[in-house]
Every structure is written in C-alpha cells, then in structure tokens.
Amino acid sequence: MSDLEKFREEARTWLEQNAPESIIGVRFSELDGNWGGRKAEYSNPDMKIWLERMADKGWTAPTWPTEYGGGGLSAQEAKALNQEMAALRIPPALVGFGLTMIGPTLLRFGTEEQKQEHIPRIVRGEIRWCQGYSEPGAGSDLASLQTRAVREGDEFVINGTKVWTSYADKADWIFCLVRTDPDVKKQEGITFLLIDMETTGVSVSPILLISGKSPFCETHFQDVSVPVRNVISEINAGWTVAKALLGHERTMIADTFGASSGRGQKRSRSVMAEHAIRYLGEREGEIADPVFRDEVARNEMDTRAFGLTVQRAKDAAKAGHQPGPESSMFKIYGTEINMRRNELSVRIAGPQALGWDGPGFDEEEIAVTRDWLRSRGNSIEGGTSEVQLNIIAKHVLGLPD
Amino acid sequence: MSDLEKFREEARTWLEQNAPESIIGVRFSELDGNWGGRKAEYSNPDMKIWLERMADKGWTAPTWPTEYGGGGLSAQEAKALNQEMAALRIPPALVGFGLTMIGPTLLRFGTEEQKQEHIPRIVRGEIRWCQGYSEPGAGSDLASLQTRAVREGDEFVINGTKVWTSYADKADWIFCLVRTDPDVKKQEGITFLLIDMETTGVSVSPILLISGKSPFCETHFQDVSVPVRNVISEINAGWTVAKALLGHERTMIADTFGASSGRGQKRSRSVMAEHAIRYLGEREGEIADPVFRDEVARNEMDTRAFGLTVQRAKDAAKAGHQPGPESSMFKIYGTEINMRRNELSVRIAGPQALGWDGPGFDEEEIAVTRDWLRSRGNSIEGGTSEVQLNIIAKHVLGLPD
Amino acid sequence: MEMVLTEDQELIAKTAQDFVNEKSPIARMRALRDEGDPMGYSRALWKEMAELGWVGIALPESVGGAGMGMADLAVVVEALGRSLAPEPFVSCVGLAAAAVVELGTAEQQESWLAPVASGDQAMAWAHLEPETRYNPTAISTEARQDGEGFVLNGRKVQVLDGFGAESFVVVARSHGSSGELDGVSLFWVPADADGVSVERQTLLDSRNAAIVQFDHVKVPHASVLGEAGQSGEALERIIDRGTVVLCAEMLGGMSEAFRLTVDYLKEREQFGTRIGTFQGLKHRAARVFMEIELARSCVMAAVRAVDEGNEEASKLVSLAKARCSDAYILAANEGVQMFGGVGMTDEYDIGLYMKRARASELTLGDANHHRKRWSGLSNY
Amino acid sequence: MEMVLTEDQELIAKTAQDFVNEKSPIARMRALRDEGDPMGYSRALWKEMAELGWVGIALPESVGGAGMGMADLAVVVEALGRSLAPEPFVSCVGLAAAAVVELGTAEQQESWLAPVASGDQAMAWAHLEPETRYNPTAISTEARQDGEGFVLNGRKVQVLDGFGAESFVVVARSHGSSGELDGVSLFWVPADADGVSVERQTLLDSRNAAIVQFDHVKVPHASVLGEAGQSGEALERIIDRGTVVLCAEMLGGMSEAFRLTVDYLKEREQFGTRIGTFQGLKHRAARVFMEIELARSCVMAAVRAVDEGNEEASKLVSLAKARCSDAYILAANEGVQMFGGVGMTDEYDIGLYMKRARASELTLGDANHHRKRWSGLSNY
C-alpha cells in the first residue's frame, strides 16, 4: 500500500471515530457553515466539538505548516482527506476568510511574528476575519481608495469607510487597504493592514441588498489607532499584496461556481433537470418543454466545459506550467454561468418563482427567487466582469491601451 | 370617390393596358432588376418597352417634379401606384442608385443646371450611377479619404482610388467624395463631385467576395479631369452632402431588410417556416424540431418588431414629428436581423447548405449558402454596426466622448 | 393602424406624467412596501385616478367610462409604470373589468363596472391555480350547476390585487377537465359572499396578491358571465386585453430603468473619467435603447390591434409580451451591472425595477410561451 | 484523465506546427481551390504525413500504425486545422479506418488499413444520404443477402474525400427501415468494384466530397465488417471517433482565425488610433478568447475519454462538438466583422475560416443536435 493509501485509511478511521454523529450529512451552504470567531453561535454544540477535534489535528487547514498549528499535509493528502470527508458526508469543521484569504496571505507575506500571532488562531477558528478593500464610490477603481492612515509614532491613525465588507458585523478582525501616502501614484501609496474590530472607533452597519439579505456591511473608522506592526509586507507596498490576494479570490470564485458541478452524474438526473420536470412536466422521459430542455442542456454543458477548463488549469499547474492570468476568465465565466443558472431556475419555476415569503410558496421556491437576486451581484463583486475583460484584453491578448 | 381613389383607378387601368404581359409576375432580386444605363442589356426586350412607357409618364420617379421628367405625384398617390403595381404583380420599371441616392441628393443640393442635366436622364434610365465614398484603408473612418482633386482653372484633376463602388463596372457616372483641401480638419476639405466614368483615366477592377460574387469594384482615377461645375453644393462642403445621403442610405437599408416582411401572412406559412418544414419535417402541423421552431419564431418576431418600428418612424414623420438619428438604429437592427435570418436558413438546411455548386444541391440550396455569405457584409457596408452604436450612444443617449 | 400618438393621447401622457411626478414618485411604492401596507396600493390615489378618468378610460360610457380604447389606457399605464405605481390596472381594469365588458349584459356591466369606473371599488381577476402556469384553460375550480345558479369550489392563487378587492371575476369549469377549452365559465363573486376566504400573499415585487378559496360558494344565475361552459374563447381575448395593459406598464418600467442607467453612466466617475465614456458600456447601452424602441413599437401595435379587433391582434399581443419581457429583463440586468455594487443594494431604485421586470415577465406568459403561441398562430 | 499534454504530445505538436509552417501554409489550400484540383488535397503530402507517422498514429501497430491514441492524433490534426490543410483525416482516419479498427478482423485490418497507414491509399466514409441529416441510422441504402455475400444498392452524398479514394466503408441496411438501429451493416467496398460510380461535388469549403452510387454492387462475405445488421451501436462509437478528429481540426481553425483577428486589431488604424484600443472590440475579443479556451478543454476531455473508453465519452464528444461549432462560428463571424470590408473579400484569409467553420459545424451534427444528444444521455 502506498503512503497515500495508508494516510487515506488512517484518515477515514479517524474521521469515523471522531466526527459527531449529529453533524453527518448536514449540508452547509455559504451562509450557515461554521465561520468560527469570538461571536460564533452554535445551534448544534457538536459542531463546536467537531471544530476542536479537527483543529487539534490541524485539519481545519490541512496543508498549512504544523509549526503554526496546521496539518502539514501534502496537497495529495489534503485531497484524500477531503474526498474521505465527502464520502462520509462530513461537513467541513471551519470555513471563512481566515482560511481562504488572510491565512495564505500571511503565510506568503507575513513576518514570523505575524504568523505566530494569527495563524494558530485562524486554524482553531478563534478569530473570524473580514476584508476591507472597497470604499463608497470607488467601485471597480479599487486603487482610488481614500481611507487615510496617518502615522503617529508606532501607530497609524485610521479614518475612512469601507463598503462591501462581508459579514463585518460578525467578524473579529479585518484586513484592510489604507492610504498611507496620498502624494504618489495611486497604487503606490497603499498599505495592507490588519485591524482588530474591537478597537475603539470601529463601527459597522449592515447593507440591505435587493435579495432581502445583508451579507455585507459598511465599516467606519474614526480615529482608530492600529500598531504599525500590523502592516503586512512593507508600508506603501499593499497593492502588491492585494493583487496577489485578488487573483487568489477570483480563482476561488471559479471553484465555487461550477468547477465541480455536473461531474459523474451519469444516469441520475441533475438538480436542474429535476427542477424542470417538477414545473414543466415530463414526456417520454424528457423535460416536456423542449425549448427549456435545450436551455437546461446549454447551462449544464457550459458548466461542464467550465469545470474542465478549471481542471485543465490545475493539471497544467501540476505539470509545472506557469499559470497565466486565467483567474480573470474564471471569474467572468464562473459567475456568469451561475447567474444564467439562477435566471433559468426562476424562469422554469414560472409564477411560483414570484414568492417573497409567506403562503403559497414553499421554502425551495423562496430560495430560487432569493438566490437569483443574490446571484446578480456575482459579476460585480470581486472585480466586475468588465474589469476582468479589460485584463484579458490587455494581459492575455496584448491589445493596446 | 375621393381624388386619391380616382387616381388609383386610373393608374390601375393604365397599368393593365401598358404593362407588357411577358414581364408580369417576374420577380426581380437586387441583382437582376432593371438598372438601366448605357450598357443595359435586356434579356427580355419588353422590359425596355416597359421602362419607356413608365418613363414617359414620369412614374419611374413618381414623386419627382414634372419639370425634370418626374411623375409629380403626392406621397399618397405614389403609395397607391406602388400598391396597384404590387397587386398586379408588375415589377418596377427601373431601379438603382440614380433613383434612390443621387437623384434625391441633386433635388436637394443641386443647381438648376445640374438638375436639368441629370434628373431627366435618371428618370429615363439612360444613365446608371455608382457611389465612390470608401477608399482602401479608410474603412469606418470615411472622412480620412485621400483621393485628391487639384484645381486647374475650370477643372479638377483627380488622382486616387475608391473601393466598394457597387457595380462600378456597369455604371456610367459616379458620385464621389474627393479631398480638395488637405490642410484643414479632415471633414472640412471634402468635396462632393460627379464624374463621367468614360472620362480618360478612370478604370475599374471588380473585387471577388467570399460569396463568389463581385458586386463591388475598385475604381481608380489617374489624372482625371472633371469640370468644376460638377461639384454638388459648395467646394469643401461635401461632408454635409455625404452625411445627408448616408442617413438616407441607412433608412433605405432598413426598408430593404425586413420592414415589410412578415405582414399579412395570416394563415399561410412564412417562407422560413416552409423552409424549416422542408428540412426538419412537420409534426402535428408544427416544425418538427421545437428548438428550431423557436428560432424561426424569434426571427419572425424580430422582423415584425423591426417593421413596426420603421412604420412608427414613418407615421411620426407624417404626423410632423422631427426625425431623430433613428437611421443608425435601423441600419444596425435591419442588417442584423437579415444576418440572423440567413444563418438560421443555413443551419436549418444542414448538410444541404454546404453546396457551392454542381451536383447534389438545387439552385435554392446554393442560393441559401451564397446569400448567407453575402449577408455577412451587411453589418459592415454603409457604416459598420460599431459606428452606428457610437452614433446612438452619442447623439441619442448623450453619453460623453 | 397609425403608429403615432394622437394629440389627445399626447395630452393624456403629459397629464399622467405630471401626476406621477407629483403624486406617485417611486418613493411611494417603496413606502407602501416598507410599511407592509396590506393593500399594497393607495385606495385614495386610485380614487383620484378614477376621477381623472383613467380607470374608466377604456370602459363604456354607459358605466361612467370614457368609451375610449386600450391605446389611451396604455398611455396612462405607461406613465404609472415608470414609477412602479402599484394601482390595480392590470388585474382590475385589464382583466376583470374587460371580462365584464366582453361577456356581461348591459345590466351586469352597469351594476358591476360603475363602482369600478368611479374608483369606489376594485374587482380582481381570480384565474391562476397552482398548475395553470401560462395555459389559461388549465384550471380545475369546479362550478357545479345548482338549480338556476352554480356552486363554486376551488382555490385560486396569485390573485393579483385580490386582497381587499370588493369582488372577483372567477374563472371556473362547469364541465370538462383541466386544459380543455370546453367547460370554461366565468362568474362574478363578491368578496363577502359566504364561503369566500382571502389570504394575502407576499410577492417579489411587493404587489398585492392573494390566495382566494371558494368553498361551496353559491353564485346566482344573474352572476354568470356569458354562457356557462362556453367562455373559453372569450377568455383568450380577455387575457389579451390584460396582457397589453401589463405590456404598457412594462414599457414604462423599462424606459425609466434605462433612463436611470444612462444618467448614472453620465455622472459616475471611475478611473478618472465618467464611465459613460467606455465604449464597452456605450455599445451595450445603445443595444438596450434599441430593444426598448422595438418593444415600444410592438406595444403600440398590440393596443391598436386590440382596439380595432384586428385579426392579428393575438399575434401582436404575443409579440409585445415576448419583447417586453426580454427587453425589461435586459434593461434591468444591464442597469444593475452598470450601477455596480450599489445596484445590488436595496437603497437604489434600479433593483426595484429588476424585481418588477421579473414579476411581469412571469405573469401572463413569458417570452418562451409567447413565441410558442406566435408559432401556433402562424400555422407552424 | 489528465487535462494536459504529455511531453511526447508537446513534441508532436511542435513538429506538426513546424511542418504546417513550412509545407502547408494556408496558401496551399487556396491554390488547390483556385486550380480546381479535383482531389482537393495533396496525395504527395498525405504520403509525407504518413511517413511522419501521423496517418497511422492512432492505428494498431499490427497495420503499421503507432498504436497511440486520439489524444495524440488530435494534436497533429489541430496543427493542420490551423492552416485549413485539407488532407482526409476526418473521413479516412477518423471514420473509415476507425470503423475497420472497431469492427474488422485482424485479417481485414491488415489488408485494408496497412495501405492507409503507409499513405498509399485513402479510404472514405460513405454514410450520408439526402435524408440522413444528423441521425446516423437514417439510411436506406440496401444490402441484400446474396449467398454468403451481399448486394448493395443506394446513393451516398457528401462522401467526404470520396473522390479518388481507393475504397469506401459503406453504411447500409440489411433489414429494417430508415432510422432503426437494427439492420445497420458496414461493408468495405473498393472504388473500382463493378457498379460503383463516383461523382465529384463542390462544397462551400472547397473540400473533396463526392456522390457515390452503388448499383448492384456485389460484396463478398470477407468484406462485411462485423455482423451484418448488428452494427448500429458500433456506428455511434465510430462516429464519436470521427467527431473528435473533426473537433481537433476545428480547434486549430478557430485558434488561427482568432490569432489573425487579434493581430489585425493590433495593427489596423482607424480614427487615428489602433482599433484594438476600442473597448467595444476588446471586450468582444476577450469573450471569443474565453469560448476558444472552453472549447479546447472540451476537446481535450473528449479525446481522452474516447481513448479511455470512459462511459461518459459520448457526452463529452457531444459537448466538444457543440462548443466547437459555436465557438468556431463566433470566432469567424467576429473575425470578419472586425476585419471589416476587407474581411468580406476573397483575398483575405479570414473568409476561408468562415466557410470552414460553417462546413464543420454542419458536419456530424450541429450544436442543437448535440445538445439534444447530451440531454438524452443525461436522462432528461
């Protein structure tokens, strides 16, 4: 047996023995996964136990170095672990921006002291992070940010407002871009800074979206003092850190939307096909409305083609090819497939997709509608499709400015 | 009986008595209508007789003033005449750029002398005209034209090349834009000039298109002397004349593509539906392939919506509303519907649309293919769709430059 | 048909637009929503609109209407659609009242329509059932003959503006089964009749809608519209009328959504320039403009064809609804995208148009449905 | 499956591209067309390609092939597709030879495939009939049992590369009627057999195609491929193989059409600037880029799935053909539009890609067909 197979077997055994029964098969959507943090609330206390057990092994961040509390696994081992968890229908013990964004950033750009301070707490789910990039009015022109950080001795004093800070109302720390030099080219005076949300002068107000949800907040900084040691990389070098993180974020979005969908379904019908048959009926084993049938096929085929492209990029990377600026393509295509999928879902449900809440509509129907509205933001957040198209035109195709 | 009804009755009687029997029901496509001119060839001599009879009444140009040989009819009478001709299946006696382009331009911008010289010969189909606007390399940037006209006494000496001159090889005269002042803003040094194609130094070479046809030519001018009296409007004022004519041309294109299609078909099937049933079969009275059926409906509905929009613009003009820059919209939409219609036609015919000529394909199938290739130029010629979109954005929506 | 507004219509349009600007800005709709107003629209404003002659504009003079046409009504409804005014023109005027005009006796018209034309009462169109989707005859609500009259049993959903309505026009079935033309019957039923229960629904666009339950509701002979079991064909015509009213509203909505977007493109600065200078956005805006223009032509043709009883009326109604559905969605989607992040917030109005675009698309047949209908009417 | 070229494949790709640059620029295809060459491709170059091992790359070693896979063949065909090289990889290698590999005995393979692998002979796929369209079993060509052998009667059209081919693999029907799986039979027939007549056709893309008539053609028992009447299912697999070869060619064509377009955008000046600076065109070019990237992934997956005998192979082949059809047409249409007027002239190459895009779209199933097939294979 290979080492990998041996690891897989051990992992499976450990998972079977340690995952509390009550969490098995629970499906966590983006909104109700375990995000951890000081304010974490557990409707199921077993989830907290599960987090502790996984964190003890470092398996909440399986590939991170053991010295900071990570699992120290190879990429292959981590993949095997995930596969075993999926096979056993065990949900992740922890999700969130600590694991996906600031953690990797700290591992790459952070000082030893910063890593020691933050990484273990991320692994253990003790601190929940949010991201403070966008500002009111800045939109796609991220580098035009105005939040000022004025140095006073060993501290920066921060004044300004961030928008689109996801779940800032539930977060403990925020990683931020702030302007530390207003007199140079706009990209050059930006610093990447970590701020404890409990610092005096930080306040948060949620933004109500058209979907009726408030996943985003405005975060205000009024004379907020932050130690200079919370700067990641150099002062005024924040743009480099942010760009690296943005590319990483776009790739994650690609993974979220469709990369793994549509695989291995073989003879069982897809969710969308079932949805279509529920509302449009079935005739001789087919979705009764052939025009919608064609649209369902289009969307599934788009999804599959996209998934294969993501896989190709990964396989190319594994084979040692230098990755290009594909993340822009993944951002555009992944989000747009998801938006088309949501629109299709709504159009298939027809009048039953018109419910906001209350009588006459079931939970799934309400979700179809809300998810569609939420999805309209996909091509905006994390860099609009238009900005990504510009990036492809310039950096991939080499078209002139 | 109203005067109009009386006119209609008289017209019908005259048509019945004067249209030679052999031309009735003949369907003239753009290519084989009677374009007249010195080099005109008549496979059916009755067509020539028909032209003479119609020209004698001025009905080749029914609304033009009688003093120049036109019919002197009101717009309503001209419409009635057309309707009667259509009802009797009598083809037009004359078509061409004389009637549609340079004639109206001369009536608006020409001197009395110019009108007396050219209009009667247009009405009688004695002179066939072509248009010399575009130049090699100019493309959408029409005003960048380089053909030089240098004044020498009462003459201009012309040197340069025009491209996309439709049927220049068959034309007698050309109306041209030439550069008379190279030292001013590019739109300001252009003059609109009429040139006899028989003048020494004019030569013509046809351009082979991807459709296998050569409707366009390159027209070369080498030291061609043209009397200054052939200038339309003022020297260096040609751009104004050209713009007026371009707007007119775009509207005509709109009329050509779809404005009148899809009307009054009621219970008989459209040509496209028949085409679809020929290749895809029929099931319970429907096109057997429901996805193509949907596409046929889309195209017909686009066509109808477009036709109604053209009608709306005309009715608004009749009601005294100032026309806006709608011609750009008509140009874009009319040509794009036609292109989509041709693509659909090809896709419906399937493998039978792959014939270029020879065995295995009937005439109609060959035409489907050639017409599709020809149609790809629709969104380029007469001002690209992109240029038209810019015009709408700027002049209709008022978006900033 | 003349595809141009008459001078009278131009005047009506101006009056309606002035009224909207003054009394019905979009903030009004937002307030009704935020306050959770159960009626979802203003009865007082409805009365005012009636007094201006708008509610009855296309109703017969015999009931206090103006005896004008859908073309005139469309002009008013378009203006109201611009600010998403939620008054019940589609359900009450376009559908329920149209049914009474289409099938009712002079007596029925007078007693039921007069209070509508005056703005004192609202009538709602009780048609949709959970399985109906866009097939008008896919209904199972049962009308059992009972002496001279009928007894109704069934459940109607998404009865637009049904909450608080004084009466319903109910589409039921005296015989045959769901999907059949034969057996379709229409009845007028007061909301306070025994056995009628009304439950408010909450829709995406915050409009008034209700589930209306009929439990052994007795309908006297005098409340049968037309001949029982024989109203299937009339139903198509009635729905065509309601559909053009909805299209007129959609036209107003998409036009305003687009206006907001173009204004934003002119103002909003990014990367040191106004975003309206970006050709990528310009071209897309120009395309939205074209689609709205085409939709406008189709709506104008459809209302006129309905007024003229033109044999192509149904085709033109389907053309208008298909195009309005697609164009409104396009205008809203492009609007939100061009507004960017703020377009996703409830604070900005563009999202309200996106919701209404979707709701109106999925009401009375989406574009797919109407293309199918067009194909059928075109004999392929 | 690993979605990446092996080092060997990278090498093959480079060799093939060098060969194309040196010996098969697009001017060669243009010359063959303009000279009206009846073969439409070069037998000499075909022989050279065979000597390089490309014709037999996916054929068994027993017939002189390399015994490699479709994934390796695809790399060669893509390079050839870039310059619209008209050699008969789809018809001869992808379809006819694949049929012999799929159904033939060792003896049949050796005698029929060896001269193909060596480049000395070409075999063509005689399948399409006037009514076939994209339904492989919609064929009527009759194979009547005659002692141990069969007698063929029927007419095949658009037999790709059929003119001048030394032999045909003929799809006929020993029983059943058009459209039925049962009764489908495959035969190997030399072009000089009694009763075979071949007439050259002229296609849009100037490729070699023929009408092949079979009049009482006697086929001995030894020339029956597989079991007579039972080859319907194998037919699907054979066509899948031919389809991925076509997809690989299309991928090369669309990539080159797009490269030409992007180069033009970088060079061409209008209104005093290079047209590649216009955002309207930039965004559209970026979208074409994405579609080509996705098509490439699908083709890579399809060839690998066919090689692996993956149970999803047919779905992935349909995915690849649907996307290649749409992406190639998009790349060609956008190319001609961005070239402008000159793109419409025969002088520029972009129009040649437009023709080939259409021809390959309508060969072996268009996108609509393959979406239907995908739906069926996905159990809805």
Image (tube, coloured by chain):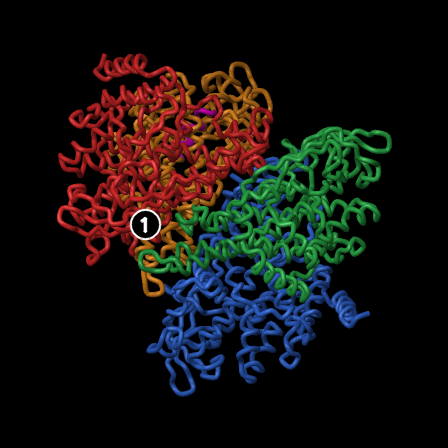
Chain colours: A red, B blue, C green, D orange
Residue A278 shown left or right of residue A79 in the figure: right
Front residue of this view, candidates D270 and C245: C245
- The answer to which image quadrant residue C160 occupies is top right
Does B34 sit above or below residue C299? below
Q: Residue at x 22, y 26 (%)?
A: A63
Look at 34% across and 77% down and name the residue there: B182
* Pointer 1 residue: A135
Name the image quarter holding the N terminus of chain D. Answer: top left
- Point 38% across, 22% down: residue: A44
Residue D245, given in percent of the width and then of the height, sits at 38, 33
Region of the chain picked out in magenta, as a range = D236-246
Residue D242 part of the magenta segment: yes
Residue A236 can be seen, yes or no? yes
Query: Is B260 on the left or on the right of C187, as rendered?
Result: left
Name above or below for residue A201 compared with residue A96: below
Quarter of the rendering containing residue C300: bottom right
The image quadrant of residue D144 is top right
Q: Amino acid at mark 1?
A: Glu
